[in-house]
Image (tube, rainbow, N blue to C red):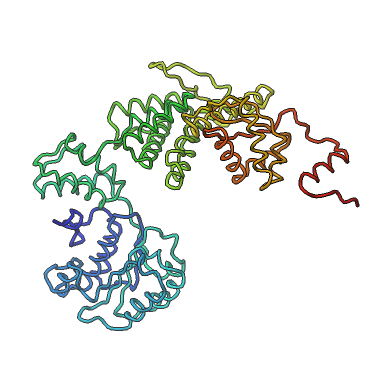
Amino acid sequence: MPTLYRKYRPQVFADITGQEHIIQTLENEISTDKVTHSYLFSGPRGTGKTTIARLLAKAINCQNRTMDQFEPCNECSSCKEISESRNIDVIEIDAASHTGVDNVRENIVENAQFKPTKSKFKVFIIDEVHMLSTSSFNALLKTIEEPPAHVIFILATTEIHKILPTIISRCQRFTFQRIPFDQMMMRLEMVCQKENIKVEKAVLERIINKSDGCLRDAESLLGQILSLNLKEIKTADAELVLPSVDSITVINYIEKTLNNSPAEAIMIVNTAINDGANLDQFAHNLIEALRTIMITQSGQNLTNTDYNQETIKKLKKLADNIPTDKIIRFIDKALVRKQEIKSAPIPQLPLELLAVEMGGAGNNGSDYHNEKVKESDNKESFPEKTPLGRPLKMTDEGLTEKKTIASSIKSAFSAITHPHHEIKIPLEEIKPKWDEVIKKLDASNHSLTFVLKLCELSSTANGLLNISVPYSFHKEKIEDKKNKKTIEDCLTQLCGEKIWLSCTVKEDAPQTETIDNQTINNVAADFGGKVVSN
């Protein structure tokens, strides 16, 4: 059984949903026999570009159409062949799989020189034309500029900014728009009627909201629901195919993050993973919820959303208690973190970082440390709204608080990296083993062991062996990825348990100091060299 969008693909211009401004122009050109030699259809996917291109090819080649008419008859051999995609004079090319210049020359440029076999026009429909290479566009340019009288080009694209301006200037350009809500509703109701299946209006509304103006997506989703093979489909039935947005989990994540509880927000993410949630979809739902909060704060009514009334009430409550500028920052950071999910070594890490950014630094940072907190009706607190663009004053108190925040963020990252690890061996027992590490590494990396001799072992907090060094270049030496792993592996072997390092520069270390000749000679000797006087 064909999919709905194929089964009900429009066969005449009157069946097209939306795009009235394009249909009117094309109908006038066809009826007056003033069809141009090249068209450029641009706009979002699933809005009718390829369908209208086929209708245009069918209408201009219709054997029964007379002057002053624009609709194809759908009865002549030409119309039937084009409808069934077997007319040899209507060539459809997917530019995504024919990007090379040789393909363009063979399939288009050379083919265009031959007259159509039995049709009035030879029509080239090039889909996703922006995928062609620059050399392919240049090869096509001359043919589009001065094509044979029997050739018509129809270029379709979703990314018009990628097409060469020289190509655009030689085409009659039409911009397709997303299908409006009401028109899409009429279309889906018509399909349901023809399928003789009653679908609850709330279900159709959810389908339209999820399709984002793309009629093809809407009809595909409707097809999935109709596959339930029920005579009447209600909201509860549709949940089997269209699971609702897990808005409660997303709202809980937002609340915990903005209530200075990043650890609880991180727990929500990890629980969602254990329950089989898709992280990319979680991030999308998060951004959509934050957008809804922002729109609510702007005074816009929430209509045509995929949220139930209880969820809308919660989102409005959040909108009343969170500063607009903070929501904007939250959205900005969420957009960035969403892009990192697929490439992150730990898939949930970007969302965990987001919770720490907005829950750790965001609420307590210098730009918000003066905000007051008020209690909401459910005893969950949020910062009061503050004027946008408030000037910042970095006082001694602010600097101290900034250091505290940095420390708390570091601890939070340590908790994420080593969630359940605790070093069991006492620090006093690790210190003798540190000397063994130095001896073991001395033969293979003498410069590293020189730095290790200067280290001071301070604690084993947060699942890390915390060490300090006199200068920053010592810290850089130890934190070199290869060096650090070598030290940690050696410690792990000697201690009998996994040991991770955390290196800091001593706060009381002098930034500069006078070094006597003897010290210089000792350092040079440690590195296997000697001092050469000028």
Nearer-the-camera pick, 499 or 359: 499
From this view, report whether residue 295 is shown above or below residue 180. above
Nearer-the-camera pick, 337 or 473: 473
Residue at the spot 34% in from the left edge and 62% down from the top edge: 41
Does residue 373 appear left or right of residue 206 in this picture? right
What is the quadrant of residue 267 in the picture? top left
Residue at the spot 56% in from the left edge and 32% down from the top edge: 495
Across and down, in percent, residue 221 comes to 22, 47
Total numbered labels: 0
Q: Quadrant of the N terminus?
A: bottom left
Does residue 359 appear left or right of residue 247 in this picture? right
Residue at the spot 71% in from the left edge and 36% down from the top edge: 453
From this view, report whether residue 360 is shown above or below residue 291. above
Residue at the spot 58% in from the left edge and 27% down from the top edge: 460
Across and down, in percent, residue 466 comes to 62, 30
Across and down, in percent, residue 393 comes to 66, 27
From this view, report whether residue 533 is shown above or below residue 35. above
What is the quadrant of residue 174 in the picture? bottom left
Across and down, in percent, residue 169 comes to 43, 68
From this view, report whether residue 136 is shown above or below residue 515. below
Residue most extreme to the right: 534
